[in-house]
Amino acid sequence: MSVPVVQLSGIKKSFGPVDVLKGVDLVAHAGRVTALVGDNGAGKSTLIKGLSGVQPYDEGQVLFEGQPVELNSPRQASALGIEVVYQDLALCENLDIVQNMFLGREEISQTTLDEASMEYQAALALQSLSVKTVKSVRQKVSSLSGGQRQTVAIARSVLRAAKLVILDEPTAALGVAQTEQVLQLVRRLADQGYAVIMISHNLADVFKVADDIAVLYLGNMVAQLKTSETNHNEVIGYITGISQQVKA
Amino acid sequence: MSELTLKTGQEGTTAEQFRAYLSRLRAGDMGALPAVGALLVLVALFGSLSPYFLSLINFANLFVQAATLMMMAAALVFVILIGEIDLSAGVTAGTGMAIFVKLQIGGMNWILALALAFVLALATGWVIGTFVARIGVPSFVVSLAFYLAFPGVMLWILGDGGVLRLEVPEVSAIMNKNLPAWGGWVLLALCVVVTTLMGLWDRARRTKAKLPNRPIVFLFIKVAGLIVLGGATVALLNMNRSQSVIPGNEIMGVPLVIPFALVILFIATFTLDRTRFGRHLFAVGGNPEAARRAGIKVARIRITAFMVCSVLAMISGVFNVSRIGNVESAAGKSIVLSAVAAAVVGGVSLFGGRGRLAHAAIGAFVIAIIDNGLGLIGMSAGVNFVVTGSVLLIAATIDALARKRSGGSIART
Ligand SMILES: Nc1ncnc2c1ncn2[C@@H]1O[C@H](COP(=O)(O)OP(=O)(O)OP(=O)(O)O)[C@@H](O)[C@H]1O
Ligand SMILES: [Mg+2]
């Protein structure tokens, strides 16, 4: 396979005496959805926060497209093309879809906000993900459903020309139909060539969209499996610590 | 470039657009309508209760009285939009004016003295903003501290007399002189040209980006409305409103404060609607955490908002001293709450992130008319305070209920 978009090796992170990540390896490839699973407190969010530059790792190597990189701030991460869609989405409800998608990167022309250009690009990005349910791209986010909000948050990373999109429990708060929509969106994202890492507690979702499944158990990466070569029971075994196979 | 299939809210015929507008109204997105409605009701009410209310002289007076409040309301909009408050905006302005008048009387060039007042505004805004944004003290408390302290500073500056007279004709002119008749028409023409050009500019940009545009008739309606309302206003203000029958004592023309206020409101609105800073201000007011993650320097935006607030408040102070003709040690203490009421009546949400400056300006007219009308029908100042207080409470309640109904309840953690 080609050079992974991101390759972590020997990642360690501790908070005072607590070792949360104890030498974790992880790879994510372009065009593939890598599910990151593990029980509560396994260290999934901590691993992601390191990748997004919010909470740098203590030790370990990060290769981005084969090159060693430093990830010490969110700015560095997004400059590389790493975008995170947080569980709480981080959208401004008082702003509309376009304004949210360009938040912090507004385009300026003739000294003022170039609303027209931003509107066009936002609409195009949503269309490229086959989003059809929003009434208007100028709708306020406060009037959107949970699934639509998730869609906007994901489309925002597309706009930002990301290479790696990280999703923290994208379907956690959604109903059946909306979960289905968002999963399709995640799949499409990967099919368009992005590397996707998706944290999830829902194995049904994971088996539906993921190409690879990485399992964290108490700060160790106990397995990184191909979805096609594993099954629910095996994954549950790793999540609960019944099976031990440190490093695939 | 590929075709857009998603809607942008601007496609459709005039009738469809109009229906969409009506359905937005029904959904509770009423914009300035409640304030405009209140305005019309109050005009009808006071017009029927007092023959003097609808006189030419009172018409001009209303603009002059509303200008100070409007500027203070505009100031507060900047901090209310980020969900904060600045109770000290009025006394900051009072203190600045005390410094200005005192130094000028002491022999300093008046422009320099006035500039120092604005330096005080910038500094005060920066200090309040820093306490709020960097240290985390609630803005209510920080500004309350200044609210208590600044009148003391004013006492100290103004000395035993407690009052200093303004002796700068240029500053007095703002509230007491009028444009010549042709000046009013030129002003209106400028407003029409700017409105038209900005409308056309926006349309051109959308066309260039291959986006649909609203039917142009909406721009025509807007400009026509401006011409009719503005034209009537200028025509009325250009009539002689003097009570005196002696020739040569006529008072007529658009008060000088109006062009001043319009230019400042235009700049402030432009900043809020069309610049990055404005957008970020709304974002910080809507969801500071989302703003932070989007790379916005939240603390810097907050501090800047407080500085803009103090500067606009200082302009309000200049208007006030120009009208009253002196500064006293209680200057600016009572205007702040009226200005908050004006903003809230204009639909600016105290929870932050929602509201428009122009609507707050209409709200200022509502509060100014209450003040003016109650005085004319012989109500005491006490009644005036109670009514203004009640209006504030009602508007704030509507704000809270509206928030509960729309965003608040479905917000996810
Ligand atoms: N800032 C911190 N300070 C101290 N301990 C922390 C900190 N952040 C995380 N931890 C600890 O690290 C461990 C892993 O936390 P993390 O949030 O990464 O788990 P998770 O896999 O995302 O769990 P969940 O599925 O519940 O979201 C937990 O025991 C947690 O208490
Ligand atoms: Mg977590």
Image: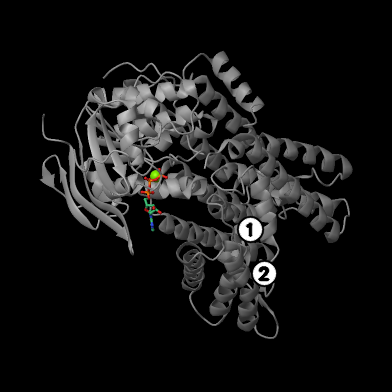
Q: Where B38 sits versus A9, above or below?
A: above
Q: Chain of mark 2?
A: B
Q: How is the image coloured?
A: one colour
Q: Which amino acid lies under the numbered mark 1 shown in the image of this protein?
A: Met
Say which residue appears at 54% left-offset and 42% top-offset.
B187
Q: Please, is residue B274 above or below residue A132 in the view?
A: below
- Between A126 and B143, the one lying in front of the other is A126
Chain bearing tag 1 is B
At x 22%, y 24%, the residue is: A229
Q: Quadrant of residue B32?
A: top right
Circle 2 residues within 10 Å: few <14, some 14–19, many ≥20: many
The Cα–Cα distance between marks 1 and 2, rounded to whole angstroms, is: 17 Å
Q: In the rendering, at what x and y percent does residue A69 appear?
A: 16, 49
Residue at the front extreme? A242
**The N terminus of chain B: image quadrant:** top left
Question: Three-letter amino acid code at disc 2?
Answer: Ala
**Residue B175, numbered circle:** 1
- Badge 1 marks a residue whose secondary structure is helix
Q: Residue at x 51, y 48 (%)?
A: B285
Q: Check disc 2 and report the residue beneath it.
A: B331
Would residue A118 be found to the left or right of residue B161 on screen?
left
Left-right relation of A243 to B390: left
Residue B366 percent across, percent down from the top left: 72, 45
